[in-house]
Image (cartoon, rainbow, N blue to C red):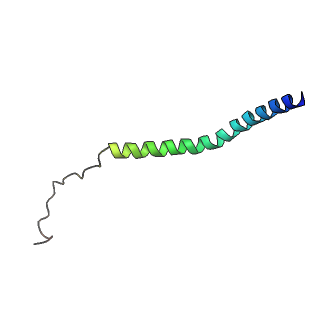
Amino acid sequence: MVNISAGIFATLFYFINRGTERKETDSAYKRALKQSKAIREAKSKPAKKKKKSSFKVIDGGKK
């Protein structure tokens, strides 16, 4: 009888602690997801191209 109640107590204790451990890893997991999402978006979006200026340099530059 004592072994059964000890087993039940140990099982309950395990599941309660398991729930508290997940909360700590969830914040790290969320940060990792956010970071990977930002990396994926950066790869899918093309880099901004420089706009050509309508101003032309008259003097200067390499000859």
Does residue 27 appear left or right of residue 14 in this picture?
Answer: left
Does residue 40 appear left or right of residue 52 in this picture?
Answer: right
Outermost residue toward the bottom in this view: 63
Which of these two is toward me, 43 or 49?
A: 43
Residue 37 location (% of width, % of height)? 44, 42
* Quadrant containing the N terminus in the rendered view: top right
Q: Residue at x 50, y 42 (%)?
A: 33
| 15 vs 42: above or below | above
Does residue 51 appear left or right of residue 14 in this picture?
Answer: left
Q: How many numbered marks does the figure carry?
A: 0
Residue 58 location (% of width, % of height)? 11, 65
Q: Residue at x 58, y 45 (%)?
A: 28
Does residue 51 appear left or right of residue 26 in this picture?
Answer: left
Location of residue 25 (image quadrant): top right
Residue 12 location (% of width, % of height)? 77, 31
Q: Residue at x 32, y 43 (%)?
A: 45
Which of these two is toward me, 47 or 63?
A: 47
Residue 47 location (% of width, % of height)? 29, 49
* Quadrant containing the C terminus in the rendered view: bottom left
| 21 vs 62: above or below | above
Q: Residue at x 25, y 50 (%)?
A: 49
